[in-house]
Amino acid sequence: MITIDTLRVREGRRILLDGVTMHLPGNAVHGITGEGRSLLLQTVCGLVTPETGSVSESGHPLQRREMAFLAADPHFWPGLTARDCIGLVRYNDRTEYPEALIRRFPVPLDTEARTLPSRERKHLGIILTLMRDKRILLLDEPFRELEPERLFVMQQLLLHLGTEGRTVLLTSGKITPLEGVCDDLYLLGGGRVLARYEHYELGRVAGIPDSGSEIPKN
Amino acid sequence: MTSAPGKRIYTRRWIRPERLGGSPEWTAGLRRHPRALWITVGLLTLCILLPVAGFPGLYVAAVACGAFYLDDEPLELLRLPELNAGRLLVRKVLTAWRNYFLLTLPFTLLAILAHPRTAWIAAAWAPLAALALLYAVVAKYAHYAPEKPRRQPLAARFGSAGFLFPVLLPLSLALTVSYALRAERNLNRYLHDYD
């Protein structure tokens, strides 16, 4: 069980997250939508330091070594090709085989990763994140930029990850792609958790025009 | 050092992180500056033909390789080996030495075979080249800040210059020790989870 406890994040005078509390069971896919979703994921990952509050698992601080993070718009170091980026991950963990992921999310391997179009950068980011055998996956907007057929593949992969013992936290500006994938969905707004929906409620929530099926992006 | 957007890099597959000890610095550095690489190879070949210039040329190449360590890599890349600060620093230094001495091995052998009488210079070249690379690595991580644009402090520039101008060498040696301690403290801010 991952516990996000009264998290408060401030930027100057603005309070971006205020008292966000979530109890996220392990081995499940949790969706987060609404304003501040990316910031919440970055805070869980340790990229942003909260003013107060904590992120813990079974009473212990969440370890970064257990997590892999996919940024909403992945950026890569200048001078490295997509093949180099994959090679670096493989060099550090020889047990990883990215071939299946490369087939599903095609990337021109001998091109500088930084100069790839945003869709292919997203593909490479997904490959690099999912090929690492991490227990907790933090995916910021994994469906953004994906074509419909890749979106379907991504949904199938997420379902598979949730059933094989990983805990997945993912954000999305739209609720529709989360239907049938997430075990629950948190709706953020005004820096707080506004609502929590169970998986069987997602279809109803996505169908209501004003419910946030097209929630504004951050 | 940051390549301009749209600038083409050398994408041939013989440059691979697996062959370069998993070093993103050397992989990106060799890809970003292919011309400089071939010019260095040409100059080193010329230097080796001259009796005393071979090992000094190789030493200058070691100082030039320090340029690979001028940019800060993204945090994800730093965390990839999943090592704590001390171990990561040791690995980075050993990888820098490995890559440099492996790439210069043919030139070293040629220099010794071509001019056996000046082979004793190698005894000075090897530790000085190793020291120059050690300085480049610890200076980088002493000031590592992944989200900010990199600015090399003036002292660090003088320290780098010390490896080319012997008057400043004592400063470089002092800075190497200072930066080594500071680098471990600085990296601990990002890698404390891997202890």
Image (cartoon, rainbow, N blue to C red):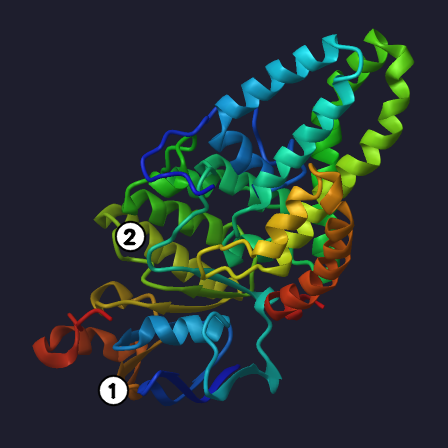
User: Quarter of the image holding residue A110?
Assistant: top left
Residue B4 or residue A142, whichever sits in front:
B4
Q: Which mark is residue A190?
A: 1
Label 1: which secondary element: loop
Measure the C-alpha gap from mark 2 to mark 1: 31 Å
| Disc 2: host chain | A
**Label 2: element kind:** helix
Label 1 marks a residue whose chain is A
Q: Is residue B100 above or below residue B51?
A: below
Residue at image mark 2: A152
- Residue B182, percent from left and from top: 69, 64
- The C terminus of chain B - image quarter: bottom right
Q: Is residue B170 above or below residue A59?
A: above
Say whether mark 1 and mark 2 are on the same chain. Answer: yes
Is residue A184 in sight in this rendering?
yes
B35 on left or right of B180: left
Q: Position of residue A145 (x, y in %)?
A: 25, 52
Q: Which numbered mark, 2 or 1, is in the foreground of this view?
A: 1
Q: Is residue A93 visible?
A: no
Residue type at mark 2?
Answer: Phe
Could you say which is closer to the camera, residue A191 or residue B3? B3
